[in-house]
Image (spheres, coloured by chain):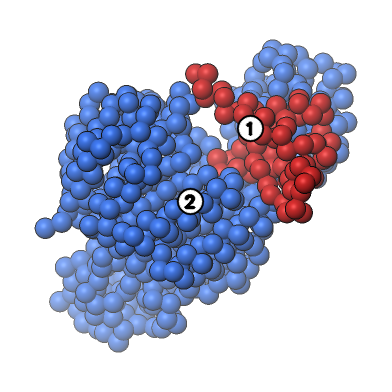
């Protein structure tokens, strides 16, 4: 089974009036899902994928998204 | 002789029935007669054919603190809102031990942007119990308040610092249940909890440490009273939200309680996920569960300054790199350097239509105050420059403390939003009134519903919109004697021009204790707002001295 990959990424407005990055994942079974990343997670994802434009995220593994979310979440644990 | 009679009214009674012409007679704070009624009255209001409806009910607010210094919940009352539900998202101001006050202030500061100074200068801390808090705000109440008790407060009361470290044991859960029972006896309309919020040290709020056993026990207590459970789910993730819908449905069926979650909003990017959430909500309603999603009417704006990185610039690598990796002085230097500035301007040209539409919303200097509220296109014209140059120049002049707004960036597809608002199982709410006061205005969503979705989009009838904001909300929340214009009901009434009602422009006003400021919007087209038979606000006289607001549903006998 193919792993999920990023197929698109767009800027969206979050509830709190800030911008967030919505990453669209396509799964091995053909289904799609969306994951919203805050500024910290989005920056971590761009770094991990070594891209400077979110348009270049397409094709990267969902694992990059998972790890980026971890970067954002872990900041709370480090307080 | 009646106390008040409203003549020449176009009555939209909140039931969803068609509008009709008539008069409304009021006696002892209640509607006495309605329709073809006449007679003498101490006071008469000529509605002049304007629309007369029940006062609106706002089910998702955070006015908890503001009510301590402003019993009118300004400016919500002026928008026709006569009943508010504070205490959402696991946070209320009671029950609260003295030693926990500053911890709670921190949570309100982080989650609702209520400044520390407002609490320091606007709040006399003279309560601990929920009952005493309600007594305190009741002293000067012009709006009705249906208060939720926050789950995080119950945990904090019972578990102290452990409330933010671990699950509760059986004794602690029993004590929380006892506290909740006391709050419901005192008049709480339900309990709120959150699965996403954090305090000012970025630690999860106490409610997030609860396990299912604890939530079940508290839901059982809500079931004894038939009261509401409100939650904040992981709203940014469709699948997690669906899991919370299922969890709420199970609690609703098992304990026969209404439940609601907020927010739910629809963007181009999450439309499929929202469709799936609504499909699950409708499935659960079909099984007898009550799981009401709250959907706001207003679109979401994005604010930014160059002092903090914003993802709005992520498609502009040079801009984003400067914002993300540079110090304050380095950003100023980059904006000031002709070569770097030219590079930024060239890159910005890739999204040329965006910049003229941005609005300058806040500056520190007096000299630039007249420009606040203007678009960059307007400012550029005044200054004889380009919008992007104006944005850079203003940022330099304000030492990067110039704030800009990109309007209607989310929840902005009218067709999709209207479809969601029209869903029978969708509850209009999530205004967040009294919260996010430093970021955007949370007032006027009711006016926006009429102006945008009733008048401009023709997506909802006037009668349906009124029903959604009044009787439907009262029914969902079990708020008694409100939401309908019918004899015997409390005379909470809004009079407005259906062709004019709207929200005004957003502006910044310094009216928060401690010299604090907030974003607000005035109402447009609202003529008179009546609470319990007395005029509480009118377009002519403004706010009155009326203090007829009540706690709803009120203390149990």
Work out whether B261 lies above or below B473.
Answer: above
Residue B16 position by quadrant: bottom left
B193 with respect to B309 (left or right): left
Work out whether B223 lies above or below A72.
Answer: below
Tell me the SS state at disc 2.
Answer: helix
Residue B244 - label: 2
Between the residue at mark 2 and the residue at mark 1, the CA separation in whole angstroms equals: 20 Å
Q: Which chain's residue wears label 1?
A: A
Question: In this structure image, what is the colour of chain B?
Answer: blue
Residue sitting at x 71%, y 23%:
B323
Q: Quadrant of the N terminus of chain B?
A: bottom left
Judged from this view, the residue extending furthest toward the left is: B557
Residue B531 on image: x %, y %: 28, 60
Task: Tell me, yes or no, whether dots 2 and 1 are on the same chain.
Answer: no
**Label 1 belongs to which residue?**
A69
Instruction: Please indicate, yes or no, whether residue B116 appears anywhere in the rendered image.
Output: yes
Residue B119 on image: x %, y %: 33, 29
Q: Nearer the viewer, residue B231 or B5?
A: B231
Q: Which chain is red?
A: A
Residue B404 on image: x %, y %: 65, 35
Residue B15 position by quadrant: bottom left
Q: Nearer the viewer, residue B461 or B180?
A: B180
Residue sitting at x 56%, y 23%:
A75
**Callout 2 environment at 10 Å: few (<14), some (14 to 19), or many (20+)?**
many
Residue sitting at x 46%, y 46%:
B232
Q: Quadrant of the C terminus of chain B?
A: bottom left
């Amino acid at each position: 089974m193919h792993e999920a990959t990023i197929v698109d990424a767009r800027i969206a407005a979050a509830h709190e009036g800030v911008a967030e990055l919505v990453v669209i994942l396509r799964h091995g079974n053909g289904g799609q899902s969306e994951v919203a990343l805050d500024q910290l997670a989005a920056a971590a994802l761009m770094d991990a994928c070594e891209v400077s434009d979110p348009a270049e995220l397409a094709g990267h593994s969902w694992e990059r998204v998972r790890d980026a979310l971890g970067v954002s979440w872990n900041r709370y644990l480090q307080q | 002789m009646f106390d008040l009679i409203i003549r020449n009214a176009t009555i939209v009674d909140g039931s969803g029935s068609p509008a009709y012409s008539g008069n409304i007679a009021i006696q002892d704070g209640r509607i006495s007669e309605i329709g073809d009624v006449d007679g003498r009255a101490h006071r008469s209001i000529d509605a002049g054919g304007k629309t007369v409806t029940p006062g609106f009910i706002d089910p998702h607010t955070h006015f908890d603190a503001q009510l301590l210094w402003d019993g009118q919940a300004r400016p919500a009352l002026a928008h026709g809102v006569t009943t508010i539900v504070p205490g959402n998202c696991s946070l209320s101001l009671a029950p609260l031990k003295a030693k926990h006050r500053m911890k709670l202030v921190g949570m309100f500061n982080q989650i609702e942007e209520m400044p520390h100074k407002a609490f320091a200068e606007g709040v006399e801390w003279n309560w601990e119990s929920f009952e005493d808090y309600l007594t305190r705000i009741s002293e000067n109440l012009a709006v009705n308040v249906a208060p939720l008790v926050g789950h995080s407060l119950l945990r904090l009361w019972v578990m102290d610092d452990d409330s933010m470290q671990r699950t509760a044991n059986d004794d602690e859960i029993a004590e929380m249940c006892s506290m909740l029972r006391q709050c419901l006896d005192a008049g709480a309309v339900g309990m709120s909890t959150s699965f996403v919020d954090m305090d000012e040290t970025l630690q999860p709020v106490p409610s997030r440490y609860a396990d299912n056993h604890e939530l079940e026990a508290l839901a059982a207590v809500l079931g004894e009273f038939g009261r509401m459970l409100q939650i904040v789910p992981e709203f940014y993730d469709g699948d997690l939200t669906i899991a919370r819908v299922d969890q709420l449905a199970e609690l609703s069926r098992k304990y026969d309680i209404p439940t609601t979650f907020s927010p739910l909003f629809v963007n181009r990017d999450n439309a499929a996920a929202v469709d799936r959430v609504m499909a699950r909500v409708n499935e659960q309603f079909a099984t007898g569960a009550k799981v009401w999603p709250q959907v706001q009417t207003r679109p979401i704006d994005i604010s930014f300054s160059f002092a903090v990185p914003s993802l709005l610039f992520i498609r502009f690598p040079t801009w984003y790199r400067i914002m993300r990796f540079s110090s304050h002085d380095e950003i100023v230097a980059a904006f000031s350097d002709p070569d770097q500035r030219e590079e930024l301007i060239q890159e910005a040209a890739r999204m040329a239509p965006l910049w003229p539409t941005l609005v300058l919303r806040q500056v520190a200097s007096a000299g630039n105050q007249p420009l606040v509220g203007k678009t960059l296109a307007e400012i550029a014209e005044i200054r004889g420059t380009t919008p992007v140059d104006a944005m850079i120049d203003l940022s330099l002049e304000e030492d990067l403390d110039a704030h800009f707004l990109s309007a209607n960036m989310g929840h902005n597809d009218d067709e999709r939003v209207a479809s969601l608002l029209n869903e029978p199982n969708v509850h209009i709410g999530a205004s967040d009134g009294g919260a996010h006061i430093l970021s955007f205005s949370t007032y006027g969503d009711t006016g926006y519903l009429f102006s945008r979705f009733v008048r401009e989009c023709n997506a909802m009838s006037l009668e349906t919109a009124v029903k959604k904001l009044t009787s439907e909300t009262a029914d969902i929340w079990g708020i008694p004697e409100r939401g309908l214009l019918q004899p015997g009901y409390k005379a909470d009434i809004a009079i407005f021009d259906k062709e004019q009602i709207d929200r005004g422009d957003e502006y910044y006003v310094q009216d928060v204790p401690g010299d604090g400021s907030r974003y607000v919007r005035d109402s447009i087209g609202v003529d008179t707002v009546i609470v319990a038979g007395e005029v509480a606000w009118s377009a002519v006289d403004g706010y009155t001295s009326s203090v007829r607001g009540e706690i709803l549903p009120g203390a149990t006998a």
